[in-house]
Amino acid sequence: MFGLGIGEILVILVVILLVLGPDKMPGIARMLGRGMAEFRRASRDLRETFETELSRPDAQEKAPKRKSPYPAEPKLIDATIEPYKPEPPPKTVAGQPPQAVPTQADALHDSESVEPEKNPPPAG
């Protein structure tokens, strides 16, 4: 039944007999038998109800039609990625370094610059 052999069942019955005593043993056996029969009856009724409801031809018609949140056919997404195109290097004249592009910081620095004195004081 539950993977128990005759020996294990006898040990369990002896322990129950010692704990409960011989007077209460028949009442508990009756109560367990009634509980098992009620459980079997309820499971059989539930199974029969499911079988009859599912075999009815109008069961499919009465069932609510669920709308899928997903489209019937998936839409393809354009997942192409443009390759990286670095900017071309600045054009140079042969033998000369490339000219730097002036920035706002350069313009600010040039306007605040003070011309150095032509004749610095002698060190000494």
Image (spheres, helix red, strand yellow):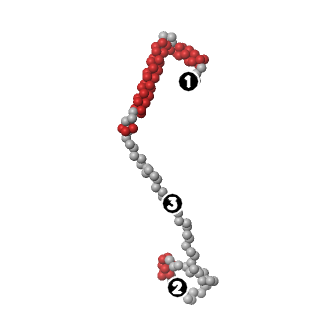
| Element at label 3 | loop
Residue pushed farthest left? 62
Which residue is rendered at x = 48% and y = 58% of the image? 77
For the residues marked 3 and 2, what is the alpha-carbon distance in whole angstroms?
58 Å
State the quadrant of the C terminus: bottom right
Query: Given the image, on which type of amino acid does mark 2 rest?
Result: Glu
Quadrant of res 38: top left
For the residues marked 1 and 2, what is the alpha-carbon distance in whole angstroms?
103 Å
Q: Nearer the viewer, residue 51 or 106?
A: 51
Which residue is rendered at x = 58% and y = 24% of the image? 3
Residue pushed farthest right? 95
Q: Position of residue 37 (x, y in %)?
A: 45, 20
For the residues marked 1 and 3, what is the alpha-carbon distance in whole angstroms?
58 Å
Q: Give me the disc on residue 102.
A: none
Task: Tell which circle, 1 or 2, labels the residue nearer the N-terminal end.
Answer: 1
Label pair 1/2, CB-CB below 8 angstroms: no
Label 3 or label 2, whichever lies nearer to me, is 3
Q: Which residue is mark 2?
A: 115
Residue pushed farthest top? 23
| Element at label 1 | loop
Q: Which residue is mark 1?
A: 2
Q: Nearer the viewer, residue 113 or 74?
A: 74
State the quadrant of the N terminus: top right
Label pair 1/3, CB-CB below 8 angstroms: no
Task: Tell which circle, 3 or 2, labels the residue nearer the N-terminal end.
Answer: 3
Q: Which residue is mark 3?
A: 79
Q: Nearer the viewer, residue 53 or 28?
A: 53
